[in-house]
Image (spheres, rainbow, N blue to C red):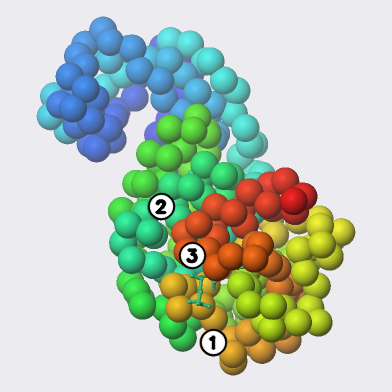
Amino acid sequence: PATQPPMQDGAILDLMPAHAHYLGTVLRLGAGDEVALFNARDGEWLARIEAIRRDRGQVRLHRQVRPPTIGPEEAATGPVLLFAPLKRDATDLVIRMGTELGVGRFLPVLTERTNTHRVNGARLAAIAVEAAEQCERLDVPEVEGPLPLVDRLAAWPQGRRLFVAAERPAQRDGAADVDAARDEGPRDGDGLLVGPEGGFSAAEVALLRSRPFVTMISLGPRILRADTAVACGLSLMGAGFRR
Ligand code: SAM
């Protein structure tokens, strides 16, 4: 966490309780065993466990193996993912896959047909940490609290595009499609919005299309599950919408 002192050779750091539990109880590591620690500010470091017991532990850093990816003043990079919260497992998958595919920020959006209005922020943040560790990403994307669609649109930052995945040709009729989106080329900090299991209502489609920063895009001829649509949309954005 940002409250930890900077990582440097010889520094002793306290482990977070969940990490101490995982390393000590689940993996059964003990004093002298080596672990890797990372964050965006300090990069990745190797450390030896000094002491570990239940949910407490200390490690001593001894070697940096990767430099930091972002400077302290730089904003997080990658696309912003706006998604309607889904059933628990599907939402977990959205966070996991989104983190692996480089999402910089997750913004849950409440739409007319959103079934799940609450998200467990702590649980999703923990999944983002796990996924970042798994894919060896040094920074961990932020997961914000849910907000209604209209508020998300009102707060949309100037100069950023929002690509909205819309599965029905009529929802995109006359609007730019994925080919036009490719010409525009997604840039770092642009957004992808994927709707809920029940899709967007006609009023929401009209609202979205009235915003100049919105481009409606297709993810292909088949109706994808919302979590699949997230993976597909982020992959296409990552590839500059090449298909
Ligand atoms: N129940 C809706 C229906 O039958 O029309 C389908 C909604 S789909 C399961 C959930 C979300 O995934 C949609 O709101 C959209 O954002 C996205 N999606 C799914 N397939 C898509 C496609 N082929 N192109 C663009 N977006 C798609």
Which is nearer the N-term, disc 2 or disc 3?
2
Image position, residue 18 (x, y; %): 24, 37
Which is nearer the N-term, disc 1 or disc 3?
1
Residue visible at 43% across and 40% down in the picture: 131
Is residue 96 positioned above or below 61 on the image? below
Residue beneath label 2, please? 93
Is residue 76 positioned above or below 110 on the image? above
The residue positioned farthest toward the front in the image shown: 221
The image quarter in which residue 164 lies: bottom right
* 141 left or right of 241 in image: left
* 114 left or right of 22 in image: right
The residue positioned farthest toward the right in the image shown: 183
Give, as a three-letter code, the residue at label 3. Answer: Ala
Image position, residue 219 (x, y; %): 65, 62
Residue beneath label 3, please? 226
Residue beneath label 1, please? 201
The reply to whether dot 1 and dot 2 touch (C-beta < 8 Å) is no
Which is nearer the N-term, disc 1 or disc 2?
2
Image position, residue 25 (x, y; %): 15, 26
Q: Secondary structure at mark 1?
A: loop
Per the rendering, the mark at residue 117 is: none
- CA distance for labels 1 and 2: 24 Å
Is the shortest distance between ligand 1 and the CB of mark 3 under 8 Å?
yes
